Amino acid sequence: MKLAARVQQVPASLTLAIAAKAKEMRAAGIDVLSFSAGEPDFDTPDHIKAAAKQALDQGKTKYGPAPGEPRLRAAIAQSLNAHQGLNFQPDQIIVTNGGKHSLYGLMQILIEPGDEVIIPSPYWLSYPEMVKLAGGTVKLLEAKADNAYKITPQQLRAAIKPQSKLFVFNSPSNPTGMVYTPEEVRAIAAVLRESEIAIVSDEIYDKILYEGTEHLSLAAADPQLQERTFISSGFAKSYSMTGWRIGYLAGPRDGIEAMARLQSHSTSNVCTFAQYGAIAALESSQDCVEQMRQAFAQRRSVMLERVQAMAGLDCPAPHGAFYLFPSIAATGLDSLTFCNRLLQEQHVAAVPGIAFGNDACIRLSYATSLEAIQAGLDRLETFMNQVM
Ligand code: PLP
């Protein structure tokens, strides 16, 4: 069968390949410890599950409005406005099948062949593929290790060209865990204001912050940018709802209406009763978010201290999300070889940095128990002592 060219160029996800290999080894009875998860290990909080079960019993099992249940759109707008100093109306919100689908849809409604999309690198691995699927061209902007994997305003200014259509910003970042300070966000916003480029700020980790770090939404940094700025987010990471597939896009009305038309011909609506779980997540106490954040904070301290002490790993302190992104450059190994050997020799799964555009690093997720973290780090230390 001859497949369409647009899908032939899309590689299979490297993260999934490592996870599949680890799973295969586990099935063969090998005790694999994994630092590869991109999802919280906690169960979805009970009150959220209860709300979805109740919605099922109440017959919320039919098609719903393509842009989402009105109560959920209103709750999302309310939450963004209250916590981020924004000013969204419910009709500026679309509920999507996860943050991933918000971003995919956005590329579809904005990007045409010849359009360039500026993406800081290291990047979340799906961004470039989504751009290519929309027929656009990727322009990577290297966020250097010596600048804590953040781009500078000067870099951004130099990268914006007449063909630049969209800038993708992600803070806190997957894979690096880095968080731009409010001052840095404002400096990026000031550069964006000099152009007419559209902006998407992926803020899916905005509630997972450490050591008093503050998150400023790029959409809140400069009111003048609001008519061309989208926020992409979702419930997966903060509420441990990865499998529910609920995300959203907030932004200018014309963009959100276009997204709703696209969604009406592609996915119709997000699972109706699942949306009632998301309503409960936003309308109930946020204690569960804080409890999970505290657990991540404890794991982060343990992991960071030990990784920073290991010879051959160089790891700046991340202040958000649940990842470390240490450099393995001192080992002389490329990231795929490093991760394959770590898995084969020590039975520890990590994600090669090449998946995120940086072959000198690996991504370690601490969305796993403290016991697994300690045991996994013992093995990583043994491995490092062997390769150094
Ligand atoms: N954006 C980033 C940076 C992510 O890490 C992820 C998930 O890994 C997503 C978006 C998509 O999340 P979901 O589609 O599960 O809501």
Image (spheres, rainbow, N blue to C red):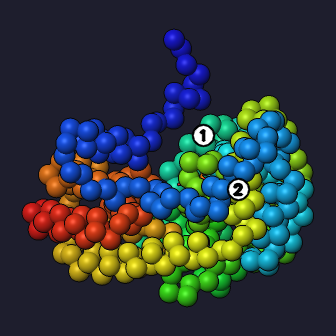
Q: Please identify the residue farthest to the left as the structure is shown.
A: 386
* SS assignment at label 2: helix
Q: Quadrant of residue 44?
A: bottom right
**Above or below for 164 versus 13:** below
Q: Amino acid at mark 1?
A: Lys
Residue 132 image label: 1
- Comparing labels 1 and 2, the label whose residue is closer to the camera: 2
The numbered mark, 1 or 2, whose residue comes first in the sequence reads 2
Q: As rendered, which of 244 and 155 lies closer to the eye?
A: 244
Quarter of the displayed picture in which ligand 1 can be seen:
bottom right
Residue at (35%, 66%) from the top-left corner?
Answer: 369
> x%, y% of residue 20?
35, 40
Horizontal arrangement in the rendering, residue 375 relative to residue 147 (left or right): left
Horizontal arrangement in the rendering, residue 174 relative to residue 78 (left or right): left
Residue at (31%, 42%) from the top-left corner?
Answer: 23
Residue at (86%, 42%) from the top-left corner?
Answer: 65
Write down the residue under mark 2.
51
Q: As rendered, which of 202 and 245 lies closer to the eye?
A: 245
> x%, y% of residue 244?
61, 48
Neighbours of disc 2 within 10 Å: few (<14), some (14-19), many (20+): many
> x%, y% of residue 211?
50, 87
Q: Quarter of the image for the C terminus: give it.
A: bottom left
> x%, y% of residue 252?
86, 58
Q: Amino acid at mark 2?
A: Ala
